[in-house]
Amino acid sequence: MSARVIVVGSANLDLVVTTPQLPRPGETVLGGDFRTVPGGKGANQAVAAARAGADCDFVGAVGTDDFGMLLSDNLIAAGIDVRGLRTVDGPSGVALIAVDGAAENFIVVAPGANAALTTLDAADRTAVAGADVLLLQLEVPLAAVRQAAEWARADGTTVVLNAAPARPLPAELLDLVDVLVVNEHEAAVVGGVFTEEPGALLDALVTLVPRVVLTLGARGAAYADRAGTRIEVPAPKVDAVDTTAAGDAFTGALAVALAERGGTLTAGTATAVLRWACAAGAACAQRPGASTALPSRAAIDALYAVTYGDAA
């Protein structure tokens, strides 16, 4: 049987403009190319997981506007099961994204229909129970995130939380998380330790959850667990064009790698898992856009082999 990942999360239409430099507060800059791209952290991670080889279900909400149909069609085209996708009255979620000449970006999200995902239903629970990994983010109401995590814990499905956008989280939710995935900013907010030192961030977070994956951008990623394991892997060196969805590519691939290992992440498997996720993030950064840039399994495997010298 194929690895199965279920994503409970957001779907947004990304309105993306390129610009030589990101504007400062109060500043107007002249941009370049403009494009609309299906996105949202939840939908991106679902597409990333599907392209990386998993059977994937998506639970979320879109609006009754034209954007909603675009978002639904994008998920279906990726081979994702969308029986858990609701359509609610009003606008779909929208993200306003600027990308500069160094591939850095800023993002402002208007939640739209995503805010309506406050409760899940019996069909959603069946899908959660049938998955190897439940993948969550924080662009939908926390009540739905916690409900999905509670069901996963009760049914033996591994819970992976990408704590983005960053916010302090209640202990009741963190107690349900098996693997926390955060970047350095998110780690500082969730862990309450405002430092740029990865070791200190990991030390703080493993007091809250049993396993932590810390993404370090172009430097790679690090792993820690409560047994004292500390692992850091470098990322492939690539010419980055757009990093907008690189984190989602990383997280989606990580979920697939875990699902293929029965939902477990151990000291013995962490190096290979993190390398493969880093290869996914780097492959994504080589192309513009969000969901359109998410790499295939073949692309991930190829970059993994070139960078790390063996098969994933």
Image (spheres, rainbow, N blue to C red):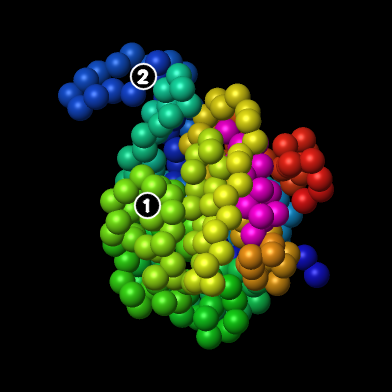
Residue 142 is situated, as x and y percent measured from the top left of the image, at 35, 67
Residue 15 appears in the figure: yes
Residue beneath disc 2: 21
Q: Residues within 10 Å of mark 2 (few under 14, many from 20)?
A: some
Residue beneath disc 1: 186
**SS class, disc 1:** helix
The residue type indicated by label 2 comes to: Gln
Depth check: give the residue in front, 224 or 12: 224
Residue 100, compared with residue 292, is above or below; it is above
Q: Sequence order check: which comes first, mark 1 or mark 2?
A: 2
When asked about the image quadrant of residue 144, the answer is: bottom left
- Residue 198 belongs to the span the image colors magenta: no
Residue 254 is situated, as x and y percent measured from the top left of the image, at 62, 56
Residue at 36% in and 19% down: 21
Task: Please provide the residue range marked out in magenta.
Answer: 270-285
Q: Nearer the viewer, mark 1 or mark 2?
A: 1
Quarter of the figure that contains the N terminus: bottom right
Residue 303 is situated, as x and y percent measured from the top left of the image, at 73, 37
Residue at 55% in and 25% down: 241
Is residue 117 left or right of 247 when viewed as pictured? left
User: For residue 140, which numbered disc appears in the image?
Assistant: none
Per the picture, the main secondary structure of the magenta-coloured stretch is: helix
Q: CA distance from mark 1 to mark 2?
A: 24 Å
Q: Residues within 10 Å of mark 1 (few under 14, many from 20)?
A: many
**SS class, disc 2:** loop
When asked about the image quadrant of residue 56, the answer is: bottom right
Depth check: give the residue in front, 70 or 26: 26
